[in-house]
Image (tube, helix red, strand yellow):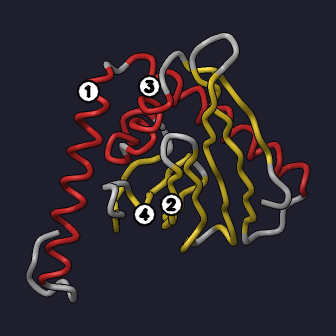
Amino acid sequence: MAEHTRSSTTIDATPARIMAVIADFAAYPEWTGEVKEVEVLGTGADGRAQQVRLLLDAGAIKDEHVLAYTWDGERQVSWTLVKSQMLRSLDGSYSLAAARSGGTEVTYQLAVDVKIPMLGMIKRKAEKVIIDRALAGLKKRVESVPAASAAAATSATSATSAAADAAEAVDPAGTGAES
């Protein structure tokens, strides 16, 4: 990511628990605020989402975009924009590392390019607001949801995605299969 904004926070949980919450896309509308609808479009062999459609509503800004995800175990997840109405590009990542004081340090990095002209300074401020809100929401979600619930939700999301993939494989044109 060339020009980006980054921020970090420490979360009192293991990297595996944090990644379970990040990977639970179906729960995003419950805790992110701006994400109103999520659809996992494809998953990898590990059951984690590889492509996700998100419907966002942040008041004056409404957009639907598709992101492609790359997972590096419990260390990092990164994403890049596949499709959007308002954005030209979007590259982001969550990186997790053991914190010196205990828990896990989570670093969110983001670079966004919008289709409308915007001063770099204003764009970086918007990225900073997005990152800070996302980290605060993630921290609150991870530290307030029991670990078993997060793991079960991730398993259910993976099973639902696998069923949708199987239905698409049977009927790739989507002419009669439910997804």
Q: Amino acid at mark 3?
A: Arg
Image quarter of the N terminus = bottom right
Mark number for residue 141? Answer: 3
Q: Earlier in the sequence, mark 4 or mark 1?
A: 4
Which residue is under mark 1? 149
Q: Earlier in the sequence, mark 2 or mark 1?
A: 2
- The quadrant in which residue 31 appears is top left
Left or right: 97 as drawn, with respect to 123: left
Please state the horizontal and vertical placement of residue 99, each as a whole percent of the image.
66, 20
Which residue is under mark 4? 50
Q: Nearer the viewer, mark 3 or mark 2?
A: 2
Mark number for residue 163? Answer: none
The residue at the point 17 percent across, 69 percent down is 179
Please state the horizontal and vertical placement of residue 28, each as a whole percent of the image.
40, 42
How many angstroms separate mark 2 from mark 4 (CA)?
Answer: 5 Å
Please state the horizontal and vertical placement of residue 67, each as a whole percent of the image.
51, 64
Dot 1, how many residues are within 10 Å of its Cα: few (below 14), some (14-19), or many (20+)? few
Dot 4, how many residues are within 10 Å of its Cα: few (below 14), some (14-19), or many (20+)? some
How many angstroms separate mark 4 from mark 3 (CA)?
Answer: 22 Å
- Taking the view exactly as shown, the residue that stands out farthest to the left is 176
Q: Amino acid at mark 2?
A: Tyr
Which residue is under mark 2? 69
How many angstroms separate mark 4 from mark 1 (CA)?
Answer: 22 Å
> Tags 2 and 4 in contact by the CB under 8 Å rule?
yes
How many angstroms separate mark 3 from mark 1 (CA)?
Answer: 11 Å
Left or right: 135 as drawn, with respect to 67: right
In terms of depth relative to the viewer, which is nearer, 85 or 160? 160
Q: Amino acid at mark 1?
A: Ser
In terms of depth relative to the viewer, which is nearer, 19 or 109? 19
The residue at the point 34 percent across, 56 percent down is 46
